[in-house]
Image (tube, grey):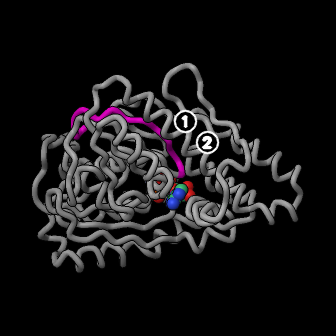
Amino acid sequence: MARGGRGRLGGLILAIETSCDDTCAAVIDGAQILSNVISSQAAFHERYGGVVPELASRHHLELVNAVVAAALEEAGTELPAVDAVAVTQGPGLIGALLVGLSTAKALAAAHRKPLIPVDHLHGHVAANFLEPAPLEPPFLCLIASGGHTLLAAVREPFSFEVLGQTVDDAAGEAFDKGARLLGMGYPGGPAIQKAAEGGAPEAFDFPVAMSERGLDFSFSGLKTSLVYRVRDLGPEETDRRRADLAASFQRAIVDQLVAKLRRAARSGEWPAIAIGGGVAANAELRDRTEALCDELGLRLKLVPLALCTDNAAMIGSAARFSDQITYPDYLDFDASAESARLAV
Ligand code: KG4
Ligand code: ZN
């Protein structure tokens, strides 16, 4: 397969991201975001309490052309002027990924442009390379989303090493499942954060998984613990103490994330810490990570909220440092539900 060089690709990149339930397209020029359009499907999936894969694919299909057109228009450009088309190859929901990949292939092929397949997790890392205030490696990066929770050692922009990852649920999944148990909507993270505002985080004692070994995460015990709490309290008491339950549950998730960040930072190798993924939108996590960085004398990089949750600008950003595939070699290129290259 003919691949172009890997480097700091300049010029305009049109990027498409459809790995889960957001239909996203963006145009970037180097580290500058010219447009970043996100069409959230959350309202469609809310009634089911989580993302329904088949519905997500169908909505992507309905939305993707309009979202791409909006991204190009907002950037003040047109497809012929774009230098490359980037797209999330995986990991994610296979049907959802295929919609983005097929669209990207068709657009690139129609104009004989190169295609740049991107690992979604590399995208979350690469959100840090975008304006405003791009962060240069090396840095320690926590990515906590609905599908993934991992600590990445970022030593260069085109790769990262996984230092630790979840052995069961992702942090965002824990928020989502917790919210469902507490009778709140989807996505659960923002709902728990809001409910927690009026609650006492020390009201309930939830377990914080801290294995002796390494930097892996675990959230399934926490979820089980909430199941038992809710059962023991009964519906009326659960309802009355919802704010305390949400605050304590949120505290347990954040405690674990920050403890592992602290443990990873102990090596002294890292001048900066970055946090990304949807859970990085969490106010308590942001505050606590800031306090950790102050304490350890490290620089903290918090990407803007719109770049924390899934978006296509981060995919374009990763593409700048990824392999290009020239026309027509990408025509038989496939999506991958699993992370194609966790350490890219
Ligand atoms: O990165 P993302 O948009 O999609 C995935 O790749 O999964 O992350 C979505 C996840 C959901 O689980 C959602 O509940 C969580 O991020 N999330 C939050 C907050 N906003 C979104 N979790 C905690 N606090 C928030 N404010
Ligand atoms: Zn994501």
Main SS class of the magenta portion in the image: strand
The residue carrying pointer 1 sits among few (fewer than 14), some (14 to 19) or many (20 or more) residues within 10 Å by Cα, namely some
Please report the residue visible at 28 percent of the width from the left and 37 percent of the height from the top.
139
Classify 55 as above or below 149: below
Q: Is residue 59 left or right of residue 341?
A: right
Q: Quadrant of the C terminus?
A: top left
Mark 1, residue position: 166
Q: Does the magenta stretch include residue 203?
A: no
Residue 157 vs residue 211, the one in the foreground: 211
Image position, residue 1 (x, y; %): 23, 39
Which region shows up in magenta?
146-160
Residue 218 coordinates in the image, percent (x, y): 60, 35
Residue 148 among magenta residues: yes
The amino acid type found where label 1 is placed reads: Thr
Numbered disc 1: secondary structure: loop
Could you give the CA–CA distance between mark 1 and mark 2, rounded to whole angstroms? 6 Å
Residue 127 badge:
none
Q: In this view, does 244 lie above or below 69?
A: above
Q: Residues within 10 Å of mark 2 (few under 14, many from 20)?
A: many
Residue at 33% in and 36% down: 140
Residue marked by disc 2? 169
Q: Which residue is drawn at 21% across and 35% down?
A: 156
Is 117 placed left or right of 55 in the picture? Answer: left
Q: In which quarter of the image is residue 316?
A: bottom left
The disc labelled 2 sits on which kind of residue? Answer: Asp
140 lies left or right of 225: left
Q: Which residue is drawn at 38% across and 25% down?
A: 266
Callout 2 secondary element? loop
